[in-house]
Image: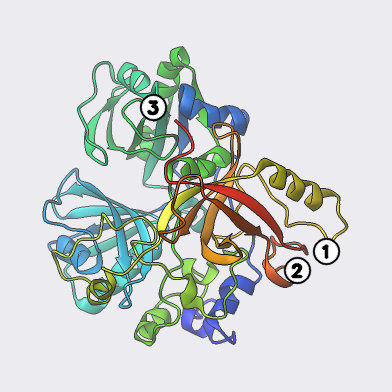
Amino acid sequence: MAHESLQARLERYDKPVDMLRNGPHKLFSLAYARQHSNWRDEQAAWMQTAVLFDQSNHMNETYIKGPDVVRLLSDTGINSFAKFGRNKAKQFMVCGYDGNLIGTCVLFGLEDGEVSLVGPSACANWVQYQAEIGGYDVEITWDRRTADSDAPRRTYRYEIEGPLAKNILEKAHGGPLPEMKFFGMSEFTLGGAPVRALKHTMAGAPGDDNMGLEIWGPVEDAQRCLEALLTAGEEFGLVRGGALAYYSSGIESGYLSQPVPAIYTDERMKAYREWLPGDGYEAKFSIGGSFASDDLEDYYRTPWDMDYGHILKFDHDFIGREALEAVKDEPHSRKVWLRWNDDDVTRVIRSSLFDPRGTGAKFLDYPLSRYARVQFDQVLAHDELVGISTLCGYTVNVGGFFSLAMVDQETAVDGKEVTVVWGEENGGTGKLGVEQHVQFEIRATVSTKTLVG
C-alpha cells in the first residue's frame, strides 16, 4: 500500500509491539562495503594507527533554512540553544509529549539560519512535522541515504579515528590544523579542497591521543579528499574500514544507538502517526532480544536512561519538558559496559552451530551481533531483572564479546556479576533474521568505563 500511513499499518496488528517485535523484518542492512581488508585489522587500526570510514551513504541529511530555524529546534529539542550558531554542533535529540525519546541525530550549524540534521530520520521527521503544523518560516530539504533514493548525494562524509589521525590530517592539509574542542567544528583544506570537520570519537577510547574527525564537503570533491587522506596515510599505516568495523566501533566508545521512537502509543501522537508513511523508518523499526513485554511503552527510554542527561537543559520550553521535569529527581538507569564470559560465549556459539535446529542457541554473529534495529536483552542479577543489554558484539581491542547496557543504579558497580539472557522467547519471534532457537544465559561483568584504552 504505497500511500498507507503508519497509523493504518499499526491498526493491522492487535498491539503496536507486535509490529515491531514480531513483524517479518529483515536483518539490519549494511550500507557499504563490509570489509576493505578484514574487520580484525580494521578494528585494531583505530587503537594502533588510524582508520578511515566512508559515511557518505548510510545517513540521511536534512537541511533546514530560514529565519525560524533556531526557534523550531529550540521548541522541539531538549538541547540548549543559548550559544548556538555557525560552526556549532550538537548531539540533538527530541522527545514526545510523555518525555520519552523519539530519536537522536547530529545537528550541524552551517550558516546563520541554516543547519543540517544527520542520522536516522526519526528526529528530522518530527522536526518537519512540527514545522508544518506550527507554521514556522523554514524551508526543509532532504538528502536521503543512498538505499532510499536514486538521486546522487549532495555531500560526501568521511570519518578518521586513531592516535595517528592528527599526523595524517596535518600532512594532507599541509600544516597544523585549527584548534577544536570536543564536538567543535572547523574549516580547512585537504589536498587543496575545502572541508568542514566535527571533532568527536566514534571508535576506541576518547581522548586527545585518539583523535576523531568527521569530515565533509560537496560530493564533487569526494575523490580529491579521499586521495589526499590515503596518500598522507601511507606513511602512518592508515587502514580503510568497512561496515562491519564501523558498526562495531560504537560499542567500544559507548554509543547506545537509537531509542525506540516514543510515538506508537500516545493518543496525542495519532495525527503524527497519520502523517508518517507506512513504509518509512518508524514502520520498519524492529526490536529484538530476550526482553519481552506486551506493552510497547516498556521499551521507551528517557534521555537519562541513554546517558544523555547532561544534554537535557530546562532553560527553554520544548515538547516533553513538563513530563521530564516531573521525573528529573527519580532514579534513572545508568549506561555501563558488560564484558561477556568467554566460556559462556563459546557454549552459545557451539550450540548455535552444532545442535539440532530448534534446540540450539540463537546464532551469535560477529563482530556485530545485532539482529534488529535495537536490541533489548534481559540483564539479571540473582534472577531479578536489573537492566537491558543493547548493542553487542566483538572487537579485537577488547578481545572478547561485550555489550552496552542500561542498568539500575545499584547494578552500575565495577566488577559486579550479572547474567545476559541471549535469544528470544518461545523459540523466537517472526523477524526474518531469527531462526528457531532456545534461550541461553551468558555471565557478564559490569564496567562503568570503556573496556579499551
Q: Residue at x 31, y 69 (%)?
A: 330
Asked which quadrant contains residue 20, the reply is bottom right
Disc 3: which residue: 224
Residue 282 visible = yes
Disc 2: which residue: 427
Of pointers 2 and 3, the one earlier in the residue sequence: 3
Which label is found at residue 358? Answer: 1
**Label 2, label 3: how many angstroms apart (C-alpha)?**
51 Å
The quarter in which the C terminus is drawn is: top left
Q: Amino acid at mark 3?
A: Arg
Q: Residues within 10 Å of mark 1 (few under 14, many from 20)?
A: some
Of pointers 1 and 2, the one earlier in the residue sequence: 1
Q: Amino acid at mark 1?
A: Gly
| In front of the other: 421 or 194 | 421
Residue 5 visible = no
| In front of the other: 108 or 345 | 345
Residue 196 coordinates in the image, percent (x, y) = 27, 36
